[in-house]
Image: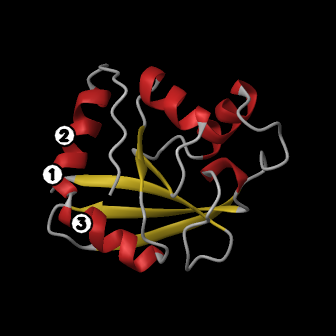
Amino acid sequence: MKKIRLCIGSNDGENVAKTHMGDTEYFFIYDLLENLEHMFVEKRVNIAINMGHAKTEKMNEIINIIKDSDVLVARQKSPNFIRIAKKTKYQPVVVEAEKISDVLMILCKSFHEIYEHTARRKNGETFDTIPEL
C-alpha cells in the first residue's frame, strides 16, 4: 500500500501554526495511507526554532530532524519552502485549514496528486511546484 510521511509544524498538536514551519515549536509526523487512513507517528522538537529566519543552515537542520518525511506542511510559503521545492527530495505543501484534523482530511482527498509529486522527487527529479490546498 502506498504511503506518504507528513511533517506538520504546530505549537499545540491540534492546529497548524500560522507561521512558517521552521518557526514552530514541534513537528508532528503522520503517515497518510492510500486507503485514506492516517496514523500519528510522533512529535519531534524543533531544535532549530531560534536559528535565523530564511537561513540555509536552519533549513538543513530542520531537514535533519524530519529527514524520513516526504511532505512538509505549513500555512505559509517561506523562502526555505521555495528552496526545498527547487533543490531537495521533499515536497512542500501549503494549506489554508487551521486544524490538523482538517488538514489530514484535505491531504487524504489529494493523496494521489501529492503521492505523484513525492514519487517524482524520490526518483531524483526536482521542481518548484508547491501545492496550495
Q: Residue at x 29, y 38 (%)?
A: 118
| Dots 1, 2 in contact, CB < 8 A | yes
In the visual, does 129 lie left or right of 14? left
Q: Cα distance, mark 1 to mark 3?
A: 8 Å
**Amino acid type, residue under disc 3 in the picture:** Cys
Q: Where is residue 38 drawn, in percent x and y?
A: 31, 71
Q: Residue at x 31, y 53 (%)?
A: 4
Q: Cα distance, mark 1 to mark 2?
A: 6 Å
Residue 109, quarter of the rendered image: bottom left
Quadrant holding the N terminus: bottom left
Q: Which badge, 3 or 2, is on the more N-terminal residue?
A: 3
Q: Secondary structure beneath disc 2?
A: helix
Q: Which mark is residue 116?
A: 2
User: In the rendered picture of this protein, how many numbered marks are placed on residues?
Assistant: 3
Q: Where is residue 7 drawn, in percent x and y?
A: 49, 55
In the visual, does 112 lie left or right of 72? left
**Amino acid type, residue under disc 2 in the picture:** Glu
**Amino acid type, residue under disc 1 in the picture:** His
Q: Which mark is residue 108?
A: 3
Give the camera-side residue of 40 and 94: 94
Give the camera-side residue of 37 and 102: 102
Q: Residue at x 77, y 45 (%)?
A: 48
Q: Where is residue 16 drawn, in percent x and y?
A: 55, 68
Disc 1 residue crowd, few under 14, some 14–19, many 20+, Cα 10 Å: some
| Dots 1, 3 in contact, CB < 8 A | no
| Dots 3, 2 in contact, CB < 8 A | no
Q: Which mark is residue 112?
A: 1
For residue 92, above or below residue 112: above
Q: Secondary structure beneath disc 3?
A: helix
